[in-house]
Image (spheres, rainbow, N blue to C red):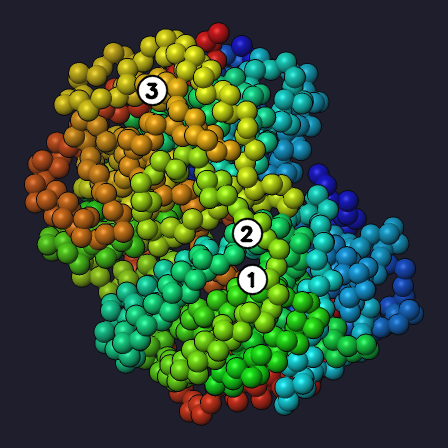
Amino acid sequence: MGLEEMQVEEYRIVPWDHDESVPIGVDREFYIPPEIERVAHEVIAQYDMQVSEMTLITSKPDKGGAIWRIMTDKGPRSLKVLHREPRRSLFCVYAQQWLVEQGARVPALIKTKSGQLYVEAGHKLWIVTDWISLVPASKVDIEGAESLVFGLGEFHRASRGYVPPEFAQQKSRIHHWPKYYSKMIEKIGWMRDLAKAYPDAAGSGQLLSVVDQFESQAKEALAKFENSSFRRMVVKGDPYWGLVHQDYGFSNGQVGEGGIWVIDLDGVAYDFPIRDLRKMITSMMDDMGVWDPAIMRRLIQAYHGANPIDRETYELLVIDMMFPNEFYKHIKEMIFDPLLFMNTEMGPILERVIATQESKQAALAELEREAESYAPGDYEEVPAEARTAPWMRESVGSALEPFGLQLDPSVPSVPGVPSVPSVPSVLSVTSEKADSIAPAKEESALVVLPEIASVADADVGGPIYGSPLASEPQGATPVATVAPAPNPAHAERRPVPPATDIPAIVLPRRAVQRSNRTPRRRKRLASRRTGVRPRRRTQAKPAVRSATRRKAKPKKLVARKRLNVVRRRKAGRRKVRKAVRRA
Amino acid sequence: MNVLMICTEKLPVPNIRGGAIQTYICGVAPMIGRRHRLTILGRTDPDLPDVETVDGVHYVRVRSDDSFEQYMQNVFDYLRGTQEKYDVIHIFNRPKLVAAVRQAAPEARLFLSMHNDMFKPEKITIGEGGEVIGQTEKIVTISNYIGHSICGYYPEAAPKVRTIYSGVDLSRFTPWLMSDETRQARESLREQHGLSGKKVILFVGRLTRNKGPHVLIKALEQVGHSDAVLVIVGGTWYHNETAFSDYVSYMRALAARSKLPVLLTGYVPAHEVHRWFYAGDVFVCTSIWEEPLARVHFEAMAAGLPFLTTARGGNPEVIHGGNGILIQDPNDPLEYASHLNALLSDIDGARQMGMRGRQLVERHFTWDRVAREIMDVWEAV
C-alpha cells in the first residue's frame, strides 16, 4: 500500500446532509458534526503550531468537506478536510505542492511535524496552508476579468510538467473529449424524447421547436472537432498540457500580493487548459446576455499573455465554444422532472438562451477567422493506420453510433508512452502463426459452431461451441505498415464499432455554475449524490418500487427580469461575507 | 493439484453481493473443489470472515477498499507469505495481476479468465499486455468475441485463447411450465405486483445507457398488446443506489409517460432475482455496447423464456437452434416492437422457443460443464 500517511482515526468522515443528529434549524453549511471537530483537533496536533482560534468558514455537508480559519502562533492559517477519496485527493495535494515550488501564487502547504504534506484522518485527507489576504477581482470592468484570466494562464503554465507520485490516483480528462461531446449530443436527444413524451407541459412545444437546431450545432461542432488537431495534441501527454482547475472563477481566483492567487485546488486534473478558459469566457458572455467578440478577444489575449497558446489550441477553444454548452447546461435540468421544469422554470431560461444565439454565432464566426494570428504549434502527424486498433481495420463502415466517435484506442493514458503500438515483431510472427494455430486445432478436437436446425444434432456431450481459433484461416497476409496483420476472419464478422464502451454515466463534475447555486438546486443535487460503498442491509427491502411520477410541488413563481443580475447580486453579497475564504 | 483462484477487487466470493464473475466462481467451485485442493482468494467483506473453509473449499480474503492497486499489493503479500505451494493459479479478469502473481509465485502455472475487454489499449499498455500473454499458459474467455478482441490486439495470444462459455444454476432458474413450485412462485409474484393475466416483457440488468433499456421503453409505443407490461429489474450497480444518475432519471421520466405500464423494481439482490424470471414471458437484452456475453441469457433460457438480444459483442453467440431472436439495431425501437408483437401474438410459439432454450442450457450450460472445461485446460499438457 502506498499511502505513507499518519493514520489518526478509524472513524470515517461522511456527508452529514442527511444526518439526523444535526440539530433542527441549523444551517448545515455552517455546522460541523462534533466527531469531525474532534478529528480536526487531532489533525492539528500533528502540526508544529499552537492554535488559539478556530473558525469554521464553510463546509460541504453533501460531500463531507470543510474549511476553517485558524489563528496560530505562526500566523493565520487554513485547515481543510478534502472530501474526495484520499487517493484522488493526493493528486491534488501534490499538485498544490508542485505549483508552490514552481512559484505559482497558490497557498503554500504547511508540513506536519513528521514532514508530511497532509494528514489522513477519518479516511479523508487534511491539509493546512497559509492564510492569504485576498480580495475579489473587480466585476464591474473588463480589467477585472482580464486579470482573472491572466491569473488562470499563470496557473496553467506553472502546472505543466507535474507528475503525481505513484500512489496517487492519476486524474486525466484529456482523452474524454470525444465521449464528453457524444454524451452531450445524446442527452440533447433525451431532452427531445422527453419534450415529446410530455406534450402537456407548457414549454414542451417551444423546446421541441429549437432542440433540433441545438443538436445540429453540437453535431457540426463535433465534426469540426474530429477534423481538428486533437489527436495529435493528445499525444504530447498529460504533463505537457498541465492541470485545469475545473472550478475557476471570481471566488477561486482573487487578488493578493503580486497578482491573482488561485485557491481551492480540490478538483484539479490533467486537461487542455482551454477547458477552464472556455468556461470562464462563456459564462461571462452568458451573464452579459450578449456575446461580444471584442471582450472575448481581450480575454483570450490576456490569457495568451500568461500562458501562450498556439493556433491548434485556439482552434480547440473556439470549437469548444461552438457547442451548445449554455443550452445544455441550463436545460439539462429537465431530465430530473420534465413536467415541473418545463411548466415553471424553463420558459425564461430557454428564451434567454435563444436570444443570445445570434450574437454567439456571429462572435464565434469572427473569432474563428482569427486563428491565423496565433502561431502554429509543433504536433507530429499520427499515422492513419496506427490510429485504429488492429482488429478495427477490417470493419466495414463502423456503425455511426451516437457514442461512436473513434476514440484513439492506441493512445495510452500513461504519459510518455508512444501512441503507436510498438509490435514490430508481429510481422515476423505471421508465418509462425500458421504453425501455431495448427497444433491448437488438433489438440482441441472440438466442433465449430455451425448453424444447425436442432439442438439434438450438435450433441457430443461437450459444448457445441468450438475453440474460437480452431477454425481461423491460417496465416494472415502481412500489411506493409507498423501495425500487426489483420485477421481475415474478422472480415466475415459484422462491422464492429470501436471498443469505446461508455462507463455508467455519472454526474459530471460541474464547475461553479450559477444555475447550481440556488439552495433548491443544491438540495436537489445533494439528494442525487450517488452512493459508492455497498451498504449492509439490516432488513429486507421490498423488491418493488413502481414508477410514479413525482408530484409537482407547488412552486412560488418569482418574477425574474434578467437572471444574471439577480444572481450576481446574490453572489456579490456572499463574496463580501467570504472575502477571506482561503485555500 | 493445489489450485488458487484469484477473484477481482470489486465484489466478494461467494457472490453474496452479486457479480457475474463471482457467480461464475461460485458455480464451478464445488466441482473443482471435489477434484482438486481449491483456495479462492478474494476481497474482504463485512459479512464474511477473512479465512474460512466451506464444503472443502478454502477461502482467503484480503482488503481491497475497491482499489485495484491496494488489492494487488495484498494479493502479492499473501502469496509471498503463504506456506502453500500452488500448482495452478487462475486469475479472473485482471491481466494486471499476472506480473505481481508471477513474481510472488514463480513456480505456479498461470491461467487467465477474461470476462471483458481488459486487454484493450486504454486499460493496459501494449508492453505490459504482451508480458501478460507471455506469462500465462492459457487465456480462457467467456465468448468468442472476447477471444477475437484479445487476438486482435495480441495476435501472439491466438494459440493460448479458448472460449469457455459460462453456465447457470438450473435448479434456481427453472421454467414455471416444468414445476408446480415455480408456477406458484410466478403467480404469487405476479399477483403481488398487479401482473396477473399480463404478458410480461422482462429486462434484467444495470440501468445504464449502454445497457439500453430506454429503447425498450420507447418500443412500447408500437407494441399492440394492451395487456403487455414491461418489467425493468435492476439498479445502477450491484447495490442500492442512493440517488439517480442522469440516465435513470431520463428512463423513469420516459417510463412514466409510456403507453403501456412500466414497472421499475430497482436493485434486486442476486439471490432474489431469479423470481423475476419466473414471472416473465419474454426476456429482452437491449445492450448497445459491445457486451462480452451477458449471463442473463443463460438465466432466461434456463427459466424457459424466449429472448430478444442484440447483435453486439458476444451476445449473438447464444442464439442457437431457434432459442432467441437477434436485434440488429439496438437503437431502433421499431425493431424491438415488431419482434415483440410477433412473439406476444403467438404465446405457444414463444413458450416453445423458451423450452428450446431450456433444453440447450440443460445440455450445454451447466456449471459442471464449465468446471470440467476449466479443469481440462489445466490438465492439458
Badge 2 element: helix
Residue placed most toward the observer, A369 or B306: A369
The image shows residue A191 at horizontal and vertical percentages of 33, 67
- Circle 1 sits on which residue? A312
Q: Chain of mark 1?
A: A
In which quadrant of the rendered image does the C terminus of chain A lie? bottom right
Residue placed most toward the observer, A385 or B245: A385
**Amino acid at the residue labelled 3:** Pro
Badge 1 element: helix
Residue A232 — which label?
A: 2
Which residue is depicted at the point 28% across and 37% down?
A494
Q: CA distance from mark 3 to mark 1?
A: 45 Å
Q: CA distance from mark 2 to mark 3?
A: 36 Å
Q: Are marks 1 and 2 in contact (CB under 8 Å)?
A: yes
In the displayed structure, B215 sits above or below A449; it is below
**Amino acid at the residue labelled 1:** Glu
The image shows residue A418 at horizontal and vertical percentages of 60, 41
Give the mark, 3 or 1, whose residue is nearer the N terminus.
1
Residue placed most toward the observer, A109 or A419: A419
Q: Chain of mark 2?
A: A
Give the mark, 2 or 3, whose residue is nearer the N terminus.
2
- Circle 3 sits on which residue? A473
The image shows residue A310 at horizontal and vertical percentages of 61, 64
Q: Residues within 10 Å of mark 1 (few under 14, many from 20)?
A: many
In the displayed structure, B158 sits above or below B93; it is above
Residue A189 — which label?
A: none
